[in-house]
Every structure is written in structure tokens, then in C-alpha cells.
Image: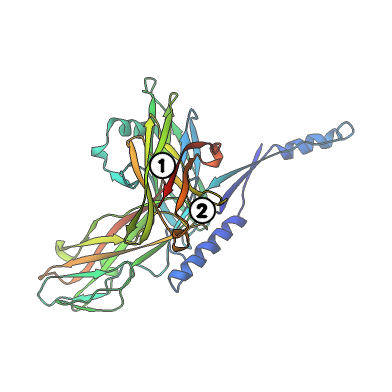
Amino acid sequence: MTIRGLKRLRNICVGLGAAASAVALSLSPAQAAGDLLVAPTRIVLDGQRGTEIILNNIGSETATYRISLELRRMTAEGRLTEVSPEDANELEQAAKEMIRYAPRRVTLPPNQPQAIRLGVRAPKDLADGEYRVHLLFRAIPKARSVTASPEQADGFSIALTPIYGVTIPVIIRQGNLSATAAIANARIEQGDEGQAFAFDLSRTGDRSTYGEIRVMKQGVNEPLLLVRGIAVYPELASRKVSLPVPPEVAAQLKGPLSIEYYEPRNIGGGLITKTELVLR
Amino acid sequence: MSKFIKAALASSVLAASVMGANAAHAATANADARANILEELTVTKDAGTDLDFGTIVTTGTAETVTVGTDGVRAACVNVVCSGASDAADFSVTGSASEAVTLTVPGSVTLSGPGGAIMNANLSSSALTALDASGNGAFSVGGALDVAATQADGAYLGTFTVTVDYP
């Protein structure tokens, strides 16, 4: 017998945090219909047959959500760009075909979580490699009819409804895969939004690398710069990583530094690669 | 920062009842407790914020009406613009210092009365990573192409914005 409970207290804290940040941006902190929470934020299936994802309606109204499989490719700048179904390559097509999930559409009252079950049915002759899709969760907006808009004697009115959502990667690893990474060409760049610390992160092997980047200075315990969730996907041999430099850090970002790339703590937190340099 | 906690208490009730029946023999009772802590992320649209170009009255000359990601509408020269303008503002929460990317369509087509269409090019403010508290925000603005002979009426369109976790 299993009793499952979802702890709500932390959720309320999340809600307060979101509301507080909304206050800073607008005067009306109430949340709109279609707001959503998704957990976890990344799925790696390395031999496991399936998992569950939690989708929660954190808006103030009942909303209908649609869950779909999307394809994304990483650019050399580390951005994820959309790939239309007709442009899918063999690997992406195979990934899409082996994933089963349900439900694909769900209507949830406010603060109602729903588990989405996801399973993998790999064909027997599946070639070794890393297969990836991105699972998209989005709210379907309520239909708005043209006649509902106030009639205007002159000119026109415009209603642009945003559909907003979240994608999380679903990665399936087949076979015994490995990858290594290396860091090179660290430099300071001047962008539109101030200084950025940039470097090239290269990857070799047959799977992606994923982890956090720490920029350390000799004699300083805390990282000067820290960013989590830096991935290099198999479609790339190298990508640029650009970290914005806050003004208070800019003066310290000189002299002997090290750039360290670690795996996430929940899978061991091992060092993937590290490089030392002197920045003038 | 925030964690979504899913606690699974396995067989503790059953174990307790069995133990109760054999209380004379059992000095201790065992119960299993498991907690699976998942990283979570949320996306919310700040209420009352929509990409709004206001009311536009054509005067027979083409014009592009632009609303920046700050919600401010650039001065209209060839058309009459009135009413408040706004950009759509979104809030994102998740793990501290986590890198994210946004997918915003470059353009969107609005359909109006009698098959009339209008095109809008969208732009968004940059969001490359959440801050040390796991918060982030971005706004979507746009540039609406109003033709010289644009038919009056109500124009509707939708666009999809996604926050992509790497």
C-alpha cells in the first residue's frame, strides 16, 4: 500500500515568490489563466523504461493544457531553435516514435496537479546513441470571438493572445555512451547589455554533456560567476558560452582564474573539465 | 530554489497495524519513508499585461506601429494612435542560476473581417539565465504593419512563447 501526498506548503511559497516578482513588474499581481508549473525540468532515461512528470495549474482559473513532443536543435550560441516535423532527421524521428505519454490534454482546476506518465518503447534494433525530444506543456487559450470585441465605428482593434508554455528535454540513452568536454578561448566581450565573460565549450563523444559552470579566482572560495544547466548536445561539437558579468564582479575578473564544468549534484557532481587561465 | 516535494510513504500504515497485533513480541516498529525532490519550473503571465497596440485609426497611408518590450508605443506618424499600449510580461521561476532560452516566433498573422490580414513582427527582451533566487522575467513587444487600405474591424491572432530548459 502506498500513500502519496503532495506537500502544499512549499507550493504556497512559490506562489508568493511569483506574486512578489510580479509586483515589481506590474501593479496587478494576480495571476492569469494558463499559468503552469512543471517538475522535473529535465529527464534522462538511461535504461529506465519510463517516468512521471508533474503538471500543476498555478493560475487562478481552470485551464486546459496540451502536452506535445517538439524538436529543438542547439545553435553554436547555445540557443534552442525549433525544428519543424518535416525537417526532422532520422535520429529525431526515431526519438519521437519511441516515446509514449498520456494524457496529452488535461483540464485542471486551480492548484490541481496531474501526473503525466511517459514511457519508452525502443525498437529491438535501435542503434546506440542519444535520442532527444522536448516535451512542450502549454495552456490552450479560451476561444475569443470577433463579435465579443466592441464594435468600433472607425479604425480597428487588435487582440493578440499569447499561448505560453515550457519545454523540458527528454533524453534517451541507448548503449554505453561517453563524452568529454574542453574549454578554450576565454575572453571578455562587450555586448549591448554590458560585459560578458565568454568561452568556447567543445564536446567529443556520442552523448551530450550537461552541468554547471563555475568561474573561480585563486584565493576566493565562492565562484565569481556561476550558471547551471549548461548543455552541449550531440548535434554540436562546440558552442559558445556567454555569461553576463555584473558590475561588482567586473573588477575582480582579472588575473589567474579557472573555469570549471561540473555535472549536476544529483548525478554525482563530478568534474567534467577544468581550465586555468590568466585574464588581463 | 523552491522544490516540489513528492513524499511517498510506503507501507507504514500496514506495518503499524501488523505490529499492533503482535505487540507482545515486537519492541520496535519499522516504517519506510521516501521523498523524491524534483526541480520545478513555473511560467506565469503577469495579469493585465497583454501585447496591446491600443486603438489605431488609418488615414490612408501605410504605417508600422511599434510597441517596445517596455510597453511604450513609438510615435505614430501616418496613423492616429490612441489608448494605452502594453507589452506582455512573463515571470519565470525555477532553479537558481539556471540557464534557459526563449522561443518567440518572429512574426504572427492576425486575421480580420472579410479575410483581411495584418502582420506583426514580435520581439522579446533577453532572458538567458535565472537569477540567484531562481527568478527571471521577459516581455514581448511587437511591430504591427498597417496597410494604407487596412479594413476596419477586429483583428485576432495568437502566438506561442516557450521557455526552454536545456
- For residue B84, side relative to residue B77 (left or right): right
The quarter of the picture where residue A151 lies is bottom left
Instruction: Give the residue at mark 2.
Output: B96
Q: Chain of mark 1?
A: A
Looking at the picture, which amino acid does disc 1 mark?
Ala
The quarter of the picture where residue A200 lies is top left
Q: Residue A231: which disc?
A: 1
| Element at label 2 | loop
Q: Nearer the viewer, residue A277 or A131?
A: A277
| Element at label 1 | strand
- Which residue is drawn at the image coordinates 57% and 56% (left, top)? A11
- For residue B20, side relative to residue A126 (left or right): right
Neighbourhood count class around disc 2 (C-alpha, 10 Å): few under 14, some 14–19, many 20 upward: some
Q: Nearer the viewer, residue A265 or A183?
A: A183
Neighbourhood count class around disc 1 (C-alpha, 10 Å): few under 14, some 14–19, many 20 upward: many
- Which residue is drawn at the image coordinates 45% and 74% (left, top)? A27
Describe the colour scheme in one phrase: rainbow
| In the depicted structure, whether residue B29 falls above or below residue A138 | above
